[in-house]
Amino acid sequence: MIELEGLTKRYGEKVAVDSLTFTVRPGIVTGFLGPNGAGKSTTMRMILGLDHPTAGDVRIDGTHYDRLRQPLTRIGALLEAKAMHPGRSAHNHLLCLAQSNGIPPRRVHEVLDAVGLTAVARKKAKGFSLGMGQRLGIAAALLGDPRILMFDEPVNGLDPEGIHWIRTLMKSLAAQGRTVFVSSHLMSEMALTADHLVVIGQGRLLADTSMAEFIERNSRSFVRVRSPQREQLLEMLHGAGVTAVESGDGALEVDGSKAEQIGELAARSRIVLHELSPQQASLEEAFMRLTAESVEYHAHSGTPLPPQTWGEGWKKG
C-alpha cells in the first residue's frame, strides 16, 4: 500500500505537487493520470525518496522509503526506460541490483526470462532499443518479487505484442494481491488495464475513484438512432418530449433517454430503425472534460507554422 498525506513539492515559486492525499491499495491496478506538467513524475519520485517533499508525507506499507531494508524486495519501480549504465550487459545490470538488495542471483535469470530478454542477456544496454530498455526496466522492478509495483509510462517503445504483455502482467500482479500503480498518457491502454483512477491537474487531486464511476461522472451518455424515416422519427421524438440532435452522419443523438424507450416509441409508430445503440463516452473524453482547466500547454490545431520554421528546404511554389 502507498499512502500520501498532504504531499507538496515546490520549486521556488512553482508548486509542482499541491497537498496530494490518496491511497494506492493492493489487489487492483490504479491508474495515475494527468496532463503534461501535472506533477505525476514528481509524485512518483517523492514516493521513492528521489525528491524530498516540501510538506506532507508519503509511506510505503507505513514506512518511508529511505527506512526500508532491501527496498527492491518491498517496492519495484520503472521510472525511466534506460536508467542503467550503458556499458553493462542486461545480466550484469540486474546482478548488481540483486547483490545490493540481498536477492539470489538465480532471480536475475528468472526475470530476464519473464520479460523476454534471455537471448540478449549478455549484450550491453547501450545497444538496446527503447522497447528492450523498457523490458529491462520492468525486469529490474520485478527483481525483488515486491508486493508493490510502480510503473511510469511502461508501454513506451513497446510493439503491440509487448503492450499486450505488459497489460496482462500488471493485471496478473494485481490479481495476486499486489499493489500496482501505473502512469500513462495512453487512455486506450488505461481503459483496458486500470480498475481505479487517481487524476491530478496542476499538482492538485481532481479524482480518486473507480474507472466506471469516473467515466460516468465526467462524460456524456446518449443513444444513437438512425432510420430511413428520419423526418417521422424526429416528429415522433418531438411529440414525446424527447430532444434529438444531428450527429453529422445522418444519425440522431438523444440525451437522457434509454434505448428501450426509443425502440418502443418507434415500434408503436411503425418507424424502421437501422441503428439504436447506447453510447458511453471513452475514458479519453472523460479525462479531457475533467482536466480541461488544468492543461498547462495548449496546442492550436489548424494553425499553420510560419514559413521560416519549415526548414531551409522549403520553397514557395
Image: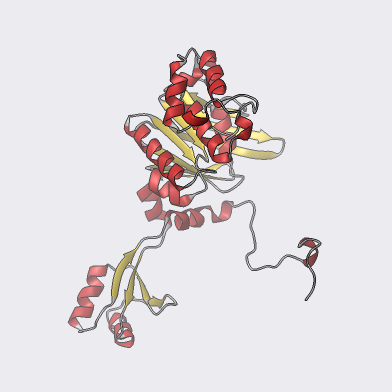
- Using the image, determine if residue 69 lies above or below residue 270: above
Q: How many marks?
A: 0
- Residue at position x 37%, y 29% from top? 178
Q: Horizontally, is 231 left or right of 118 in the view?
A: left
Snapshot quadrant of residue 247: bottom left
- Using the image, determine if residue 3 lies above or below residue 275: above
- Residue at position x 56%, y 17% from top? 96
- Residue at position x 72%, y 35% from top? 12
Determine if residue 210 is in view.
no
Q: In terms of depth relative to the viewer, which is nearer, 41 or 13?
A: 41
Q: Position of residue 262 (x, y in %)?
A: 25, 74
Q: In terms of depth relative to the viewer, which is nearer, 47 or 169?
A: 169
Q: Position of residue 317 (x, y in %)?
A: 77, 76
- Using the image, determine if residue 198 lies above or below residue 87: below
Snapshot quadrant of residue 175: top left
Of all residues shown, which one is farthest toward the left?
Answer: 268
Image quadrant holding the N terminus, namely top left
Q: Position of residue 154 (x, y in %)?
A: 50, 39
Q: In terms of depth relative to the viewer, which is nearer, 172 or 14?
A: 172
Q: Position of residue 89 (x, y in %)?
A: 58, 25
Determine if residue 138 is in view.
yes
- Using the image, determine if residue 110 lies above or below residue 17: above
Q: Horizontally, is 258 left or right of 134 in the view?
A: left
